[in-house]
Image (tube, rainbow, N blue to C red):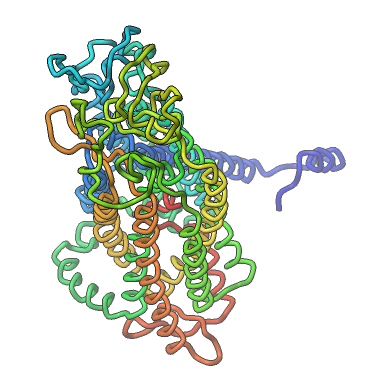
Amino acid sequence: MEISSKENTQFFSNITILPVDRSSFKSESSASKEKQSCCGGIKIFLGALSFVYFAKALSGSYLKSTITQIERRFDIPSSLVGVIDGSFEIGNLLIIILVSYFGAKLHRPRIIGAGCLIMSAGTFLIAMPQFFMGRYQYERFPSTINSTVSISPCLQDKSQTPLSALEKSHAKINAGCVQTVAIIGPIFGFLLGSLCAKLYVDIGFVDLDSVTITPKDVRWVGAWWLGYLIAGVISVLAGIPFWFLPKHLPKPESRKDSSTSSEQSKFITEDSKEQHKSYQQQVKIADMAKDFLPSLKNLFGNPVYILYLCASIIQFNSLIGMVTYKPKYIEQQYGQTSSKTNFVIGLINIPAVAFGIFSGGLIMKKLRINVLGAAKLSLGSSFFGYLLLLSLFAMGCENSDVAGLTVSYHGTKWTTDYEQALFSDCNLGCACSKNDWDPICGENGVTYISACLAGCQASNGSGKNTVFFNCSCIETLESPSRSSSATVGPCQKGNECPKMFLYFLVISVITSYTLSVGGTPGYILLLRCIKPHLKSFALGIYTLAIRVLAGIPAPVYFGMAIDTTCLKWGSKRCGGRGACRLYDSSALRYVYLGLTLVLGTVSIFFSVAVLWVLRKRSSPQDETLSANGERGTCGTKSRKDNFVNSDRLIQTTYWPEKETRL
C-alpha cells in the first residue's frame, strides 16, 4: 500500500526513534534501488519502442497519403500505384521470418535499432527518384509559361508551327502506451501528407511564379518526397536509443517467481537463468521441424480458426483497398485538393478508428462479455458498419461538365466514343491534339480540355492569370454578340457537391468507428479458441495470411478496377498513356464502394459461420470457450477466469496494420 508524501511526513514526525536493524535497512535499500533501476530501464525501453511504433506508423500512413501524388508525378495508372503500395508488405515478408527466428537468440534491442536504420534507408530510397528524374513537366499552353504577348491557341495558320505542350522547362508505457502511439503515428502521417501536398513538387528548384496550376488542378503534384525525408530522419532518431540498451533488462526480485507476468514483460525482461541454459536443454531445430506439420494440421483442423481467418482475409481486402484509394476517391468524387483530403483523414477518420478500438475493449471489460459474446459483437460491428457504407452510394457528385467527354459542345449530356467527340465543328479548323490536358473554364461553366479545343483565337496575360478570348466553341452556348472568354484551370463542381462532401464525412466517421469496435473482440476470439502452445504459431500464420492474401493483392485489383472508370488519360513525355486526368464520377462511386461492400458482405457470411460453430460447441450452462479441447476445440471455464484472461488480452490487442485502417 503506497503512502502519499504528506502522510509520510506526518507518520515520521509522530514516532519515536527506535534501534534499526542495519542489515534489514541495507536489504530494503538495495531492493528499492533495484526496483527503481528495473522500472527505469523498462520505461526507457517502452519510450523508445513507442517512438519506433510512431515512426513506423507515420511512414506507412504517409505512403497512403502520397498515392495520388506519385501517380501524377510519374504518369502511372492506379493499378501500378497499387503494386507500389503492396510492395510495402512484400518487404516485410522478406525479413519477418529471419527476425522471428533470430530475434529470440540475438541482441533484441540492437536488432530493433538495425531495423530502424533499414526502415529509414527505405524511406530515403523512395524519395530518390525525385532528384534523378528532372523537374516535373505538365501539359500547358505555351503562352501561359512566361509571356504576356497575345498568342492564338487555335493554330489556324498551318504555317505556324505549334510549340510542344510538353516542352522541357529550364526554370529552378506500458502495453497500452505503445499501441496508443501506433494510433497517433498515422494522424501525424496524414497531417504531414496534407502539409507536403500544399507545396509544389519542385519547390526550391523552380520559380513558383511560373507555375500555372493550383492544388485544385488534377495535374498538381505536391512535395511528396519531402515527407519521406522527414520520416527517414525520424526513423534514424528512433533507432538510436536501442544501440545503448542491454541485451536483457534486470527483473525485480519480487517478480522473478511470478507466474502472472504478461507476454510483454517476458519479452522485455529475461530471467538470468535462461542465459545459462545448456545446449542440450534447448529445443533442437530437427525436433521443431518434426513438430511443424502436426501443429499445422492441428491448427487448420480447428474450424473456428479457419473460418475466422477467412473472414479476416476478406474483410482486410475490403478495408485495405478502401483505405488505399480513399484520398483518390475524395479528390475525384468531391473535387477536393490532396492537402484537404489528407487533413480530413488524419484529423477525423483515424481518431474515430482509435476511439472505436478503445470502445470495443471497454465494452468487453465492463460488460464482462465471454467469447461467444465477443463473436456476436464482432459480427454486429461488421454488419452495421457495412450497412452504413451502403448509404454512401447516395452521397456522390455528378460529373463535371467537360466538353467532348461528359457533355457535347452544344451542352447536352451523352455517352458515346469519348475520343472521337473531342472534335466538333467549332474547332475543326484548329490544329489541336487530343492527347493534351490543359483545361480551361469557359464563362458558360463548361470545362474544355484545352484552349485549342475550345477554339480560342487570342490570349492575354501569363501564368495563372492567362485569359483566353474569342473562343468559338464557347460561343455555341452563348449569344453570338457576347464576347466569349475562358480562364486557366477546370471549372468547379456543382453547388450541391460541398454539401454532399459534408454528408460523406459524417457517415465515413461513423462507419470507421463502427467497424473498429469489432476489432478487439474479434482478436480475443482468435486467441481464446487456440491451444496455448499453438497461439504464437497461429498468430504467425494469421499475420502472414493477412499480408500475403490481403495487403499485397488488394491495392492492385482495386487500382485496376478504378482504372476502368477513367474518361481521359494523360500522355507521357516519351509517348504512351500516363496518369488518368478525369474519372467518371458515377462509375468511380459504384466501383469503389461496390467492391468494398461486396467483399465486406462475403466476410460477414464467414463471421456468421464462426458464430454458428461457437454456438454449436458451447454448453447450455456456459457459452464461454477456452483452449483445452482435444481437437482444437474449447472446453468450458468459469466466467470469472475467462473474463480475467480476456481482460489481459484487451490490453495487448493488435492486428496487422491496424493503425492505418480507417
- The residue at the far right in this view is 14
- The residue at the far bottom in this view is 620
Up/down of 43 relative to 170, above or below: below
Q: Residue at x 48, y 70 (%)?
A: 383
**Observer-nearest of 643 and 63:** 63
**Observer-nearest of 402 and 588:** 402
Q: Quadrant of residue 445?
A: top left
427 vs 241, left or right, is left
Q: Residue at x 67, y 44 (%)?
A: 21
Residue 282 position within the rendered picture, expressed as x and y whole percent measured from the top left: 23, 61
Up/down of 171 relative to 586, above or below: above
Up/down of 515 relative to 17, above or below: below
Work out whether residue 67 can be spotted.
Answer: no
Work out whether residue 389 can be spotted.
Answer: yes
**Observer-nearest of 182 and 459:** 459
Q: Quadrant of residue 362?
A: bottom right
Q: Residue at x 31, y 29 (%)?
A: 454
Q: Quadrant of residue 211?
A: top left
Up/down of 313 relative to 227, above or below: below
Residue 198 position within the rendered picture, expressed as x and y whole percent measured from the top left: 43, 26
Residue 579 position within the rendered picture, expressed as x and y whole percent measured from the top left: 25, 38
- The residue at the far front in this view is 481
352 vs 417, left or right, is right
Residue 59 position within the rendered picture, expressed as x and y whole percent measured from the top left: 36, 38
